[in-house]
Image (cartoon, rainbow, N blue to C red):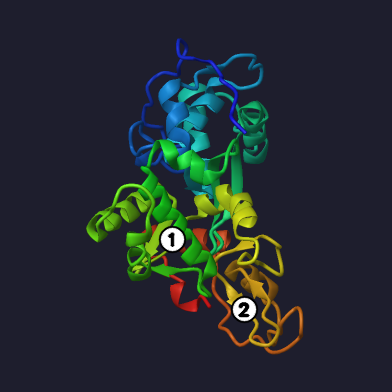
Amino acid sequence: MESPEVKLSTSASPAPLQPEAPPKGGHEAPAQFAQGHSPAPPAMQGGARRAGLAGIEGDSVMTDVHRRFLQLLMTHGVLEEWDVQRLQRHCYQVHDRSAPVEKLEDFIHTINSVLESLYIEIKKGVTEDDGRPIYALVNLATSSISKMATDFAENELDLFRKALELIIDSESGFASSTNILNLVDQLKGKKMRKKEAEQVLQKFVQNKWLIEKEGEFTLHSRAILEMEQYIRETHPDAVKTCNICRGLLIQGQSCETCGIRMHLPCVAKYFRSAAEPRCPHCNDYWPHEIPEVFDPEKERDAGVPRQSRKSLRARQH
């Protein structure tokens, strides 16, 4: 379904972004919130090029604070919850220092109420590996592959489809670069050399469709949020579902007896207080290591720097 043509005013755009004065007891606005830091993700680039977000016709609820927040989130596509909260504070500092910062859930609901008619939504999710809350701006108008058509050539889109299929069919939720590149000769459209395919895979990583870990690729959290319906419709026999949250599962752990699967964050929460971990379906012993996942209180107290966060790749089964 195509998104309706929408005219956006550019005559009253917010003032250029200035560094935020750190609020009492808070943190300075992160440098990545400066304009022009990174390109908009593919699904959003077309709309961003056509018009700004200074004012939506008929808009009676969004303020300049909301508009700047939406502009900057559009630039990044996806951010962790902590960064989203800092971004919100930054927008208040720029446009309305005296106003109390609205509860994030209500703040985003206000924006989504306006975006609804545009088939765009700010969605909340969690990362599959360590359960970090994230917010992503996703386009709901068409299937995700077709939305990428304006940013990628036909053979590049076909490479993504084949990578996606390998990821979904795999037990680990990862596809090796070797296996993906071996399918280059089967691509539709213009022929592609393996060296070119490697560069295209990196484009998918840069645009937050894929994540690369140790030479293997999996879906980015933003891609999972945006593509869940598409994946369920196009790969119904291969789709895996978490036994706890019932959400789409790409990475996780599985019971060796009955075969049910669980996201790593769901595993951690379910067995948090269990003396002996047992499968919630068959009650057999859960054979995997219980992962350590994101705990906002522990991390805030410990002051763990982002670059030192430990990968949980070895725990994925």
**Can residue 41 be seen in the rendering of this structure?**
no
Give amino acid for label 1: Ala
Where's residue 193, x and y in %?
24, 57
What label sits on residue 163 in the rendered view?
1
Looking at the picture, tell me which residue is in the foreground, 104 or 170: 170
On the picture, is 19 further left or further right than 145?
left
Residue at the location (40% across, 40% down)?
Answer: 28
Residue at the location (43% across, 62% down)?
Answer: 304
Looking at the picture, tell me which residue is in the foreground, 198 or 12: 198
On the picture, is 268 further left or further right than 185?
right
Q: Is residue 242 above or below residue 193?
A: below
Q: Earlier in the sequence, mark 1 or mark 2?
A: 1
What label sits on residue 252 in the rendered view?
none
Secondary structure at numbered mark 2: strand
- Furthest toward the top, the residue is 11
**Can residue 110 be seen in the rendering of this structure?**
yes
What label sits on residue 254 in the rendered view?
2
Looking at the picture, tell me which residue is in the foreground, 103 or 113: 113
Where's residue 30, x and y in %?
39, 41
Which-is-in-front pick, marks 1 and 2? 1
Residue at the location (55% across, 65% down)?
Answer: 250
Where's residue 229, x and y in %?
63, 50
Image mark count: 2
* Screen quadrant of the N terminus: top right
Secondary structure at numbered mark 1: helix
Mark 1 neighbour density, 10 Å: few (under 14) some (14–19) many (20 or more): many
Give amino acid for label 2: Ser
